[in-house]
Each structure stands twice: as structure tokens, then as C-alpha cells.
Image: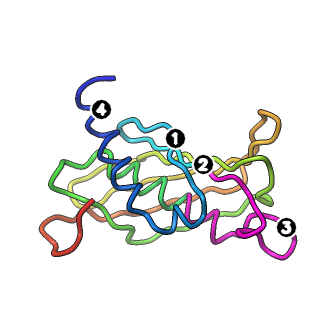
Amino acid sequence: MTTDEAGIDRRIRTSFEKQGLMHTLGATLGQVTPGQVEIMLVPRPEISQQHGFVHAGAVSSIADSAAGYAALSIMPADRGVLTAEFKINLLAPATGQRLIARGKVVKGGRTLVLAQAEVFAENDGKERLVALLMATLMAIEGRDGIVD
């Protein structure tokens, strides 16, 4: 890992630790590289819907965060990001031993970043795509109260 990559990793991990919702869901941060971030979630009854699947709100939350952190990973130190909009396709019920949201930057710009996240359900080492999110994130700087 280069010095720049170590700095990006530290920035993302420090910010993730401040995420109340991710803690509430029990989500954890996985691999972080410039333009790509993984977030994992182990299903449990508290985050399920009435049929026993992981609730779409929880799936959307880890996907949005993975895409957002992928976008943040390419920002200069004086800029953050906020999600402006996202669309998610729920492709299959979210069941398995764990969910993995893999966010990546599709196109980075000075003021807007297009990112996507794929959410996979993992069972016995096999992954199945269960959701696909596309997000537009806006770069922010110099806003009171908005820091990593």
C-alpha cells in the first residue's frame, strides 16, 4: 500500500466509524482502495422484513454508503461528498450468510461523481447479485458542519 493509499484508507475508516446507521445495522468496512470500497453486513432478525429477508432499507443503506465512500476516496482532503440522488434495483431477496456492497466510481468530476454499488448475498463462499445502485454525489467544501 502506498502512502497515498494508506491516507485514503485511514480517511475512509475514520469517517465510517462516525456513521451511526452503519453501527446500528452492524455493518463493517472491508477493502478500501482509491475509487472502490466494500461494506459487509451479516443478516439478523433486527434488520429483516416480514418474510425474513434483509430489509430493502438496510440493503439500500449499505449500497449508498459503499458508493459514497468510493466517491469520497477520490476527493482531495478539503472536499467531502453528499449523495444527491440514487436509484436502486432490487434483483433478488437479500438472504445469505452475509451481504457485501461493493461501491466504485464510474466517473469522477470536480463537482459531481457518478458511482455504483453492487450488493451480493454470500452463502457458502458463493456470491449472488441481489441489488444494483447508481448514485450521483456532489462534492462539498467549506460548508459549516460538514466534514468527513
Q: CA distance from mark 3 to mark 1?
A: 25 Å
The residue drawn where x is 38% and y is 61% is: 18
The residues tagged by marks 3 and 4 sit, at their Cα atoms, a distance apart of 39 Å
Q: Sequence order check: which comes first, mark 4 or mark 2? A: 4
**Across the whole image, how many numbered discs are drawn on residues?**
4
Check disc 3 and report the residue beneath it: 52
The residue tagged 4 is: 6
Is the C-beta separation of discs 1 and 4 under 8 Å? no
Magenta stretch? 41-62
Instruction: Name the amino acid type tagged 3.
Output: Gly
- For badge 2, the amino acid type reads Met
Task: Look at 87% across and 71% down and name the residue there.
Answer: 51
- Whether label 2 touches label 3, CB < 8 Å: no
Q: Label 2 neighbourhood size at 10 Å, few (<14), some (14-19), many (20+)?
A: many
The amino acid at mark 1 is Gly
User: The residue under label 4 is which amino acid type?
Assistant: Ala
Local secondary structure at mark 4: helix
Which tag, 2 or 3, sits closer to the chain's start?
2
Instruction: Write the residue at 81% across / 41% down.
Output: 123
Asked if marks 3 and 1 touch (Cβ < 8 Å), the reply is: no
Q: Which residue is mark 2?
A: 40
Disc 3: CA contacts within 10 A as few (<14), some (14-19) or many (>=20): some
Q: Position of residue 47 (x, y in %)?
A: 70, 68
Separation of marks 1 and 4 at Cα, in angstroms: 14 Å
* The furthest residue to the right: 51
- The quadrant of the rendering that contains the C terminus is bottom left
Residue 30 marker: 1
Evaluate if marks 1 and 2 touch, with contact meaning CB atoms under 8 Å apart. yes
The quarter of the displayed image where residue 124 is located: top right
> Going from the N terminus, do you reach mark 1 or mark 4 first?
4
